[in-house]
Image: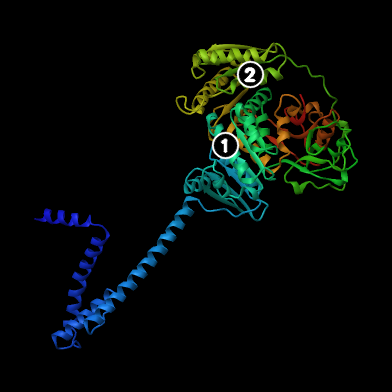
Amino acid sequence: MGQRAWYWFDNTLAGGTPVLVGWLVAACLALVVPASAVLVWTDRRAPDSLSGKLVEVWKNTGETLRLGGEAGPPLRIALSVLLALVALLYVSTLVSLITTGLSERLLALRRGRSAVLERGHAVVLGWSEQVFTVVSELVEANANQRRAAVVVLADENKTEMEEALDAKVGATGRTRLICRSGRLTDPNDLLRVSPATAHAVVVLPGDKPSEDGEIVKTLLALRAAVGDDSPVRIVAAVRDDRYRLAATLAAGPHASVLEVDDITARLVVQAARQPGLSAVHQELLDFEGAEFYTVTEPALTGRTFGEALLAYTTSCVVGLVRDGGTVTLSPPPDTVIRPEDALVVIAQDDDTTVLPPAPPPVDPTVIMPRPELTARPERVLLLGWNRRAPRIVTQLARCTLPGSVLEVVAEGGKTTATAVRVSGAAAGDTLSVVFRRGDPTRPDTLHALDVASYDSVIVLGPEHGYHGEPDDRTLVTLLLLRAMERASGREIPVVTEMTDDRNRVLAPVSPGADFIVSGKLIGLLMSQISQNHHLAALFEELFSPEGNGIHLRPAAHYVRPGCEATFATVVESARRRGECAIGFRSPPGPGATAAGDPGVRINPCKATPRRWSGHDEIIVIARD
């Protein structure tokens, strides 16, 4: 009988809302009426007659259930019950509408669907490995502003984005961090973050080259949202060079579109040829220390660029912005500064570029004459292969002397061997490319090579999805190289491409090893260009094999070793050979660790004396 009763009750509930209301009324009456009767019959002030007691029971029941509780003729009772039911229906409906509206509003806020009403803010579109670097750098750049905001729009859960940014970025100081959810290819979703009133819009690259098509669609949607004549600064990045032209056309003439693989290949080659250069790039690209700015200085109008090099004590002049925005790095010292020119400087902040009453002191007696430099062909070992490797081969061919040799050791079958042959053919006669099939993570493969005899060793990881994370195989190769260093007692000049900056501290390498973390460097570049559009052309020249670049040169070529001199003396020595000195590097000692201080000092005070050793290196911007 019990099962049949529950089955009947379950079937009645299938009748919908009216049946549920009926059961609710019956249950309430079953509790309220007996309780009211007990209260009346136990009350000494209750009427003596049965009818009087029943009237009191009705009043208690009506007050409890908000049914009026009126006594009298049946019509009066019916009308009072009707009015009470209307009031109950009205109040319950009103409460339901208010609750539903608030719930929908709170749900919309949690989903990140509300509009952002900001002006002069920075907008970051997309969610990839660069988002944490870009947001951190934008927060650092806005540290001296009162009402700054960074808005992140991505097709992700708003709460999860906020939690991830809070864990990786940490405290944002005066900068408000706002997250919104939406489709990046929908102009209506883009309008909710107010891109037209933003200071800059950064479109992050995808984690895979196959996502570059979405970047182009995002740029088209962004242009539709802000209009063709919008002055907003747009910075985007793609991974595959086939999409760069399309992305540039979609973004508009005033946008900057970076190519991740090309920049990564350039930086790998530069670091391979100049050990320690990656630490210089890191120091220049983040907002924590000194970085590039463009400033106007009317007091220097009519003076030469050579005079401007020593005009500031706490800033380094490195170039000019002229002819409507053309950036010229390290122009000839006799170049005259015109009224419409702006200076390109390296400084702690743009408001620290203040001319002192007198230039810093220079001691010409310790300046060394320019030595005769003899270049020679290079031998480079490339361990591993990925889609950026052919670009590395091409870049090496453009900057090495004829007779240079590149040996490639990679697993690879037909595809890799074909890519090596194509890269070698593209390299021409200046660089010979030799392919050896082998696994760089196996000791026997590396022991068959005299690794320490190469001028530089480049370690590349495989692509994403190749039996685990790419950095896992890279770390194994570095472990083997470190063991070979200790066994031979000779330091191996290694430059490593990594995908995750967190793995850099785990790398078992010597203190002088270089790391190119492509995702982080691209994020730093995009952040810098978003704050100053002139920097796009500046970085293009700095990272190019041709033109002016960053170089590490022995301090003994500029000042006498063992002497004490100010950095202004070094600047003057570099000026005499058409270079811009921007800092120095003291290589770590034998007991240093790979995670220690790289010894790079960018934009040191020109008036502070220092004793220069034969191990010091001067950081200059000059032609190779």
The disc placed on residue 414 is none
Of the numbered discs 2 and 1, the one sitting upstream in the chain is: 1
Q: Residue furthest left?
A: 1
Colouring used for the render: rainbow
What residue is at 72 percent from the left and 37 percent from the top?
535
> How many numbered dots are placed on residues in this image?
2
User: Is residue 450 something that shows in the picture?
Assistant: no
Q: CA gap, disc 2 to disc 1?
A: 32 Å
Which three-letter amino acid code belongs to the residue tagged 1? Answer: Lys
| Residue 295 lies in quadrant | top right
Mark 1, Cα crowd under 10 Å, few <14 / some 14-19 / many 20+, is some
Pick the residue in front: 550 or 253. 253
Which three-letter amino acid code belongs to the residue tagged 2? Answer: Val
Q: Position of residue 149 (x, y in %)?
A: 61, 51
Query: For the residue labelled by badge 2, is the local secondary structure a helix, a strand or a loop?
Result: helix
Where is mark 1, residue-wise? 217
Query: For the residue labelled by badge 1, is the local secondary structure a helix, a strand or a loop?
Result: helix
Mark 2, Cα crowd under 10 Å, few <14 / some 14-19 / many 20+, is many
What residue is at 40 percent from the left and 60 percent from the top?
100
Pick the residue in front: 442 or 395. 395
User: Is residue 243 something that shows in the picture?
Assistant: yes
Where is mark 2, residue-wise? 393
Where does the N terminus fall, quadrant-wise?
A: bottom left
Q: Position of residue 5 (x, y in %)?
A: 13, 57
Q: Position of residue 82 (x, y in %)?
A: 29, 75
Which of the two discs, 2 and 1, sits closer to the camera? Answer: 1
